[in-house]
């Protein structure tokens, strides 16, 4: 029997309707572009971000509204390579059509992609890049990691009560400069004297000549910053090999110099090192104990999560919060509004939130000392310096 023309015209519509009813075509997929460092000297740091994302997706990746799923699209920026970071971000936005961006170990890379996030209106949340001025470059950027001023400034205040003379040694790029500036300002304001400062190249540094110069200056304390990982171990070894501890020079710094995942490789030279930071795997907070236990189960009992793992975990929690509140239909401006209101009282680091005025993270900060606990090195939290510190650089700037 032949069908009349109107009946034939209905067939594609009926087929399409039946396919939609019988398939998950109505499901909403949110694409997240995740940029990390998987090759080159910074691959260890990138691996920390990757582990944080994978652990979150395994344990909490189903915490979404019905019919909504998340697709993580991963790219390698190969290290501190702004041109590569910019290229792969363009690909993620234009070709892969991601609705959200995250990751980034390195501050220069985050700065390079900032204009792209603004032009395309694709929200980006930093998992690590800590340069204080990054967020000024785009209204579609937020941070759930830290700024160096958040740890360096309160450390300078504390250190001035313990030591009269300090020497600073930092890696020669934006975060190092900011750590140096934050520490020096607070140390001097609190009555301390800075007897010398040195900036060390980011690539292939030889720390021995710098440590000898510091030893010859005879400060009471050495304030240090480097971008964590193997670089931190090399700097620690040079400090020990040249006998700065025996010369009475205390080693202090931001948490980057004694990261939990690298600490066991540093040996006894790390004992007694004092740092201020927003996280320690050794913390006895219930949320942290549960987090560390889950990490050990996933990656092995001899592996400890560093702060980058926790920062990645918290970032994913914030992104999932934004996805849930929008039912999976991502609007960039509403996403930013949700992120500005983000607050988690049960993070492994304590209570973490985002400052709505600056889109900066508000962190706790802890004074820590490297000690042996059950035969292993650990960053033992001695006291909570503050439960919630905004970026001091922006706070001080606003007061002018």
Image (cartoon, rainbow, N blue to C red):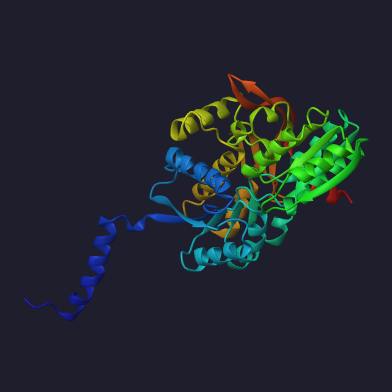
Asked if 385 appears above or below 41 in the picture, the reply is above
Query: For the view shown, which residue lies furthest in the top direction?
Result: 374
Which image quarter: residue 370? top right
Foreground of the two, 331 or 240: 240
Question: Which x, y percent locates residue 325?
Answer: 52, 48
Asked if 170 appears above or below 156 in the picture, the reply is below
Side (left or right) of 218 relative to 200: right
Foreground of the two, 173 or 398: 173
Residue at left 72%, top 36%?
Answer: 388
Residue 73 visible in the displayed image: yes
Foreground of the two, 215 or 38: 215
Asked if 211 appears above or below 303 in the picture, the reply is below
Which image quarter: residue 61? top left
Question: Which x, y percent locates residue 160?
Answer: 88, 33
Which image quarter: residue 190? top right
Side (left or right) of 266 relative to 326: right
Residue 391 visible in the displayed image: no
Residue at left 46%, top 32%?
Answer: 300
Query: For the view shown, which residue lies furthest in the bottom direction?
Result: 5
Question: Which x, y percent locates residue 262?
Answer: 60, 36
Numbered disc total: 0
Query: For the view shown, which residue lies furthest in the left direction?
Result: 1
Look at the image and tell me in which quarter the N terminus lies: bottom left
Side (left or right) of 362 relative to 262: right
Residue at left 63%, top 27%?
Answer: 378
Side (left or right) of 301 relative to 351: left
Residue at left 88%, top 29%?
Answer: 161
């Amino acid at each position: 029997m032949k069908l009349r023309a109107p009946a034939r015209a209905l067939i594609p519509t009926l087929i399409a309707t039946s396919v939609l009813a019988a398939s998950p075509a109505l499901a909403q997929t949110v694409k997240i572009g995740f940029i990390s460092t998987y090759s080159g000297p910074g691959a260890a740091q990138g691996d920390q971000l990757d582990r944080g994302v994978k652990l979150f997706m395994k344990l909490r990746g189903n915490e979404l509204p019905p019919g909504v799923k998340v697709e993580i699209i991963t790219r390698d920026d190969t290290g501190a390579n702004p041109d590569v970071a910019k290229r792969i971000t363009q690909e993620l936005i234009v070709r892969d059509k991601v609705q959200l961006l995250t990751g980034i170990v390195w501050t220069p890379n985050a700065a390079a992609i900032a204009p792209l996030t603004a032009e395309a209106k694709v929200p980006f949340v930093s998992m690590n890049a800590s340069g204080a001025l990054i967020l000024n470059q785009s209204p579609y950027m937020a941070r759930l990691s830290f700024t160096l001023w958040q740890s360096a400034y309160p450390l300078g205040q504390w250190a001035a009560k313990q030591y009269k003379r300090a020497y600073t040694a930092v890696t020669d790029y934006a975060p190092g400069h900011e750590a140096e500036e934050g520490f020096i300002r607070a140390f001097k304001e609190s009555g301390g004297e800075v007897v010398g400062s040195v900036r060390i190249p980011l690539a292939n540094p030889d720390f021995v000549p710098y440590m000898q110069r510091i030893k010859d200056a005879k400060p009471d304390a050495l304030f240090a910053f480097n971008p964590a990982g193997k670089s931190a171990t090399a700097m620690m070894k040079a400090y020990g090999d040249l006998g700065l501890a025996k010369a009475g020079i205390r080693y202090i710094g931001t948490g980057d110099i004694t990261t939990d995942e690298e600490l066991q490789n540093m040996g006894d030279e790390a004992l007694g090192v004092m740092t201020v930071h927003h996280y320690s795997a050794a913390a006895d907070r219930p949320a942290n104990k549960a987090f560390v236990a889950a990490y050990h189960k996933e990656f092995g009992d001899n592996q400890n999560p560093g702060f980058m793992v926790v920062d990645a975990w918290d970032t994913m929690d914030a992104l999932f919060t934004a996805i849930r509140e929008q039912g999976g239909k991502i609007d960039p401006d509403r996403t930013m509004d949700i992120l500005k209101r983000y607050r988690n009282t049960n993070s492994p680091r304590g209570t973490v939130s985002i400052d709505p005025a600056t889109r900066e993270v508000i962190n706790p900060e802890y004074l820590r000392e490297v000690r042996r606990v059950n035969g292993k090195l650990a960053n033992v939290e001695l006291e909570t310096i503050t439960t919630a510190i905004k970026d001091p650089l922006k706070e001080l700037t606003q007061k002018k």
